[in-house]
Image (cartoon, grey):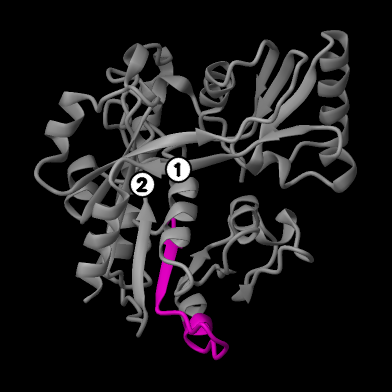
Amino acid sequence: MAIKTPDWWYKRYAAGAPWWRFLLWPPSLVWLAVNAFKAANARPYRSSLYVISVGNLTLGGSGKTPITGALLGLLAPEAVGLSRGHGGSLPGPINIDPHTHTAAEVGDEPLMLAQDHPFVIARDRAAGLRLIEKHRKAPKPKIVIVDDAHQNLKIAKDLHILVIDGDTRNGAWPFGDGGVCPYGPMREPLKQGLARADIFVLWVPDEEAQPDPDLMTLLGDKPVFIARLQAQAPAISAPVYGFAGIAKPWKFETTLRSAGYDIAGFEGFPDHAALTTAELQTLTARALASGAQLITTQKDWIKLDPAWRARIACLPITASFDDTAGLLALIRARQG
């Protein structure tokens, strides 16, 4: 399901929220009740592998995917990725073959990560773990990095890594005013979610930025590792016309500006949206009218068929850590 994220969700005091927001309060209570029932009745599967959860507290937009990719790279060759395969039609469990599977089958983010790392999708994450446990070819996996699993109750995790968007410019706050979906962006109450984390990974907006002191105070005395965006910007001499179907599309526009592009236009779409041919043709016409090159995120680009990929540029984003050695040492120490 594609979700159109309201920007007021991520304002510290819900600045700009519509007057009818109060109507969303009762559904949020239902959300909390359902999750409480699931937690009370959960019987999580314990894998023989070391399971690392990479998750967040909000409905997308925290930057989990590049962190998952970075961790898979750091822990190669003994790590395998696992995801629900959001947006894909295949229930799994299945090993993704990046040469034959499509985003429509396995989901955009898993297919993107599978370009460089072994990756499994399974709507039932326990079934996915069991598939990985049966892997017999060398190198035999020892670690599973489960993307978007902080709230998953069906599997036991050995290490909880919580990813937080630390860009607090212009009144932004990663948790909004703490409202639970749909009243706000939270999947669960803030205090509850923070307490379950072992490690925090905190994104900061650029190479020179320092983490927000208020945010660091909120996170307390648990280990915090700073992550920074690394945009692999393609050389484009013309202006660009950007588009993105992610939880916070406005952040991709900011990234394009930071990369030095002349932006002729920009359009945001709901998270995980699969653009139709008509929508792509409209974007193409607008870009041509502006003398611009279409550009999008790697997550959106991977969903396009080859003919459209040849016409649209892609801006891959990777993660770098200020203290990679420290993060790796901590993971290895906890792994034992």
Residue 105 among magenta residues: no
Left or right of 100, for residue 108: left
Q: Image height check: is 1 above or below 154?
A: above
Left or right of 165, for residue 136: right
Residue 145 among magenta residues: yes
Q: Image height check: is 217 above or below 321?
A: above
Task: Report whether residue 273 is seen.
Answer: no
Quarter occupied by residue 261: top right
- The residue carrying mark 1 is 319
The residue segment tinted magenta is 130-148
Earlier along the polypeptide chain: callout 2 or callout 1?
Answer: 2
- The residue carrying mark 2 is 56
Dot 2 crowding, Cα within 10 Å, few <14, some 14–19, many 20+ = many
Whole-percent x, y for residue 201 in the image: 30, 44
Number of disc labels:
2
Q: Nearer the viewer, residue 301 or 74?
A: 74
